[in-house]
Image (spheres, rainbow, N blue to C red):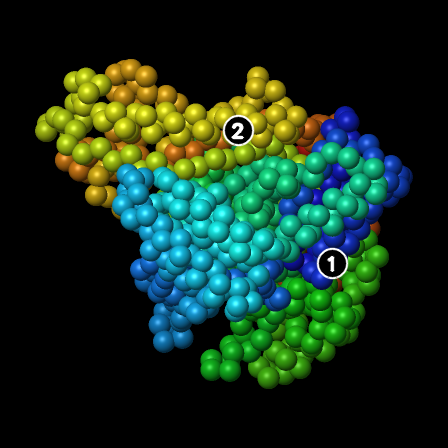
């Protein structure tokens, strides 16, 4: 299940690995409703009732935008308070210097006078400092002044706060003060929700740790409420197993243990899992995913070495210290609104979206501003009588009128030219983010395969891939439900992270090779060895318990240890898999340090090494996973190049320069080997693949449509 910004999708996988999909409009005010509407739509394709499907389901995964929506809209958000170490009260108010530009586009960032920091979720008056101090070794330097805590709680309660976040310095090394503050709050105000940073994100870097803890508390109520309502209804349908939630770090986890903050961007991460699935299925080395929904355009890069994890993600302009797989997003999709810029007189597209309500003008639900979908309808790229297989009729006349009045007439051009201009602008914006993302990583698109999905991905992939030299563009027939499909390919996964802050100075090193040259175990401090081993022991203890609760045995679990290490005095760390999980001998020390040195040299070269600064392990992590039921896409029988059997009709479709008579094909009638030359449209129930005159599409052995020049 994936509840997106405009539509929600479901994928039901049968025992043999084959699957069906379902789709329904997202109802932001009732995400529980569209959750079950999607399952019901897919159940009908199986010829079964929803009760029969759910009572026989052995795993249910859910990706949701509930937390993201609560953060983006701030509608009805709770009034929160914050208790922190005295002297740190202004951390979320001052932010960082880059906080002024975080999450803004290049054009927006250029206009410094027009930029500002995002409005803090907790106003300064509801932030209280208390005397206490734990140092960087985890030692108590100043004890907690409990009378100050009680006074702070009293003041916050009198202000009417609905929850309190507790964040103290170095609590990830010693959380005794945070836990005691929580106890005092619960003694004085037992009905208040309390969140402590050492539980949510026991990681270094206080600004992003502040944000993560606060946002986890802020979105906790709507997220938990949604999970609770869904689970109650699932029990009514005789589904008795846990509800699993897609996480931003990848993988599924039980809803009752997952932190709300980890659900942010879980839908796009589901799609990323789908790209990884196909990468393995085809045996490709490098892939890229592009998801055009109703509200946003999301891309992910899956290179040969694997997906990059973000150390600090930016969500709604806030830096978060929350493990998240890298998704790059901009406001561009089918519902993106087009308008004329008052200053330049030029057409602008986005980032504002019409969403699902009122949606594009052609939906007939009250929308007045023309959108990308309206332009597609005017250009005959979308058949208004076959939207969602004909279940939802679109009004082409309303789209035509809106574009004429709002865009074409003021600019003195035809409606079709205005519609084409809207499409060209949004396609170019999406193309720019793709090329920029690959360019800044030094990656060659000619060595990549681009997967296009989302409700509007098939419609626009020819436009946004134009000139980028991808090896090929692949569109699955279930492109519009790809995020839900991707979530169904994900393993059950948990991630545990902690910042042990192991700082080792004055290590012996070789001046010529720039390598550390330890002579015995005594060269490495005893506390560092003990802390390294204890952190991994704690990870394993928690992981085995959680995975046992998920129903997995130890021999079914895959463990991957990771470290973030650097030379002393540097600002950022190298993130890599750890070669060891315990330090028990001198050889273990040498293995760990040599591994770091090799990684560093590989990235920056020998001369950049800085052994004089010492060696630091800033963060350690353990990722555990276990395989879940996955879909199977069987290979099809080759049926030849002739696609006449799938030909529906011909109609005039607008491409560059004017309308061209184009062939229209039925997507579900295409067979392996069919070749379709542009100009053409391949129409599915919930998406349309646009093939320009200079492109061709071949159906491959998995039923996917492969676009090439």
Asked which secondary structure carries label 1, the reply is helix
**Residue drawn at (49%, 63%), measured in percent from left and top?**
154
Q: Quadrant of residue 191?
A: bottom right
Residue with the most extreme front position: 147
**Residue drawn at (61%, 25%), measured in percent from left and top?**
548
**Residue drawn at (44%, 40%), measured in percent from left and top?**
308
Classify mark 2: residues with Cα within 10 Å, few (<14), some (14-19) or many (20+).
many
Percent from the top left, x then y, of residue 254? 63, 37
For label 2, the residue is 543
Percent from the top left, x then y, of residue 92? 40, 61
Q: Is residue 506 visible?
A: yes
Q: 195 or 578, which lies in front?
A: 195
Percent from the top left, x then y, of residue 179? 45, 45
Left or right, 80 with reference to 504: right
Q: Quadrant of residue 636?
A: top right
Percent from the top left, x then y, of residue 77? 59, 64
Classify mark 1: residues with Cα within 10 Å, few (<14), some (14-19) or many (20+).
few
Real-space Cα separation, disc 1 to disc 2, in angstroms: 34 Å
Image height check: is 485 above or below 104? Answer: above
Image height check: is 626 above or below 216? Answer: above
Asked which secondary structure carries label 2, the reply is helix
Badge nearest the viewer, 1 or 2: 2
Q: Is residue 315 visible?
A: no
Q: 542 or 428, which lies in front?
A: 542
Image height check: is 469 above or below 540? Answer: below
Query: Mark 1 vs mark 2: which is more N-terminal?
Result: 1
**Residue drawn at (49%, 31%), measured in percent from left and top?**
623
User: Which quadrant would the N terminus be assigned to in this image?
Assistant: top right
Left or right, 71 with reference to 235: left
Q: Quadrant of residue 499?
A: top left
Left or right, 459 with reference to 683: left
For label 1, the residue is 30
């Amino acid at each position: 299940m994936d509840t997106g910004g405009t539509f929600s999708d479901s994928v039901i996988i049968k025992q043999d690995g084959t699957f069906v999909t379902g789709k329904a409009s997202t109802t932001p005010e009732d995400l529980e409703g569209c959750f079950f509407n999607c399952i019901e739509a897919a159940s009908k394709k199986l010829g079964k009732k929803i009760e029969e499907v759910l009572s026989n389901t052995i795993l249910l995964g859910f990706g949701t935008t509930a937390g993201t929506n609560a953060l983006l809209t701030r509608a009805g958000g709770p009034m929160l308070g914050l208790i922190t170490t005295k002297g740190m009260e202004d951390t979320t108010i001052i932010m960082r210097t880059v906080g002024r530009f975080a999450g803004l586009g290049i054009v927006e960032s250029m206009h410094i006078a027009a930029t500002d920091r995002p409005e803090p979720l907790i106003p300064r008056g509801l932030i209280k400092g208390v005397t206490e101090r734990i140092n960087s070794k985890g030692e108590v330097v100043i004890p907690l002044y409990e009378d100050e805590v009680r006074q702070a709680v009293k003041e916050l309660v009198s202000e009417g706060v609905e929850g309190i976040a507790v964040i103290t310095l170095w609590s990830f090394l010693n959380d005794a003060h945070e836990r005691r503050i929580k106890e005092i709050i619960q003694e004085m105000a037992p009905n208040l929700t309390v969140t402590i940073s050492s539980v949510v994100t026991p990681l270094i870097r206080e600004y992003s740790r502040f944000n993560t803890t606060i946002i986890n508390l802020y979105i906790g109520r709507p997220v938990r409420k949604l999970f609770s309502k869904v689970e109650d209804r699932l029990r009514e349908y005789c589904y008795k197993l846990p509800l699993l939630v897609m996480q931003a770090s990848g993988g599924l986890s039980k809803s009752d243990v997952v932190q709300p903050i980890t659900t942010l961007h879980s839908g796009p991460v589901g799609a990323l899992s789908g790209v990884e699935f196909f990468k393995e299925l085809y045996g490709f080395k490098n892939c890229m995913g592009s998801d055009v929904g109703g509200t946003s355009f999301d891309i992910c890069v899956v290179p040969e070495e694997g997906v990059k994890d973000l150390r600090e993600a930016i969500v709604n302009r806030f830096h978060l210290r929350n493990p998240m797989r890298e998704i790059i997003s901009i406001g561009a999709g089918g519902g993106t609104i087009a308008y004329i810029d008052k200053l330049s007189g030029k057409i602008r597209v986005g980032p504002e979206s019409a969403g699902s309500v009122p949606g594009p003008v052609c939906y007939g639900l009250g929308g007045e501003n023309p959108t990308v979908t309206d332009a597609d309808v005017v250009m005959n790229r979308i058949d208004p009588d076959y939207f969602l297989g004909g279940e939802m009729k679109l009004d082409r006349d309303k789209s035509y009128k809106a574009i004429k009045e709002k865009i074409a007439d003021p600019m003195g051009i035809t409606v079709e030219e205005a519609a084409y201009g809207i499409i060209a602008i949004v396609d170019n914006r999406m193309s720019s983010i793709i090329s920029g993302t690959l360019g800044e990583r030094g990656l060659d698109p000619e060595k990549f395969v681009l997967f296009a999905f989302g409700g509007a991905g098939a419609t626009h992939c020819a436009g946004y891939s134009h000139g980028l030299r991808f090896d090929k563009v692949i569109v699955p027939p279930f492109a519009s439900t790809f995020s839900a499909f991707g979530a169904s390919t994900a393993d059950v996964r948990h991630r545990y992270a902690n910042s042990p802050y192991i700082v080792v100075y004055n290590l012996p090193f070789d001046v010529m090779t720039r390598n550390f040259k330890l002579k015995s175990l005594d060269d490495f401090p005893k506390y560092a060895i003990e802390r390294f081993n204890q952190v991994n022991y704690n990870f394993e203890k928690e992981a085995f318990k959680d995975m046992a609760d998920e129903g997995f045995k130890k021999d079914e679990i895959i463990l991957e240890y990771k470290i973030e290490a650097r030379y002393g005095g540097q600002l950022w760390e190298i993130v890599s898999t750890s070669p060891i999980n315990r330090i028990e001998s001198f050889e273990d020390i040498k293995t760990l340090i040599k591994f770091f040195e090799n990684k560093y040299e590989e990235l920056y070269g020998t001369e950049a090494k800085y052994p004089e600064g010492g060696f630091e392990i800033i963060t350690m992590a353990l990722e555990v996973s276990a395989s879940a039921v996955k879909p199977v896409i069987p290979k099809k029988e080759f049926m030849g190049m002739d696609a006449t059997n799938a030909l529906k009709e011909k109609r005039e479709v607008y491409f560059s320069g004017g309308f061209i008579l184009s062939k229209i094909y039925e997507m579900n009638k295409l067979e392996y080997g069919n070749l379709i030359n542009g100009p053409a449209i391949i129409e599915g129930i919930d998406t349309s693949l646009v093939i320009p005159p200079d492109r061709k599409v071949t159906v491959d052995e998995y039923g996917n449509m492969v676009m090439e020049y």
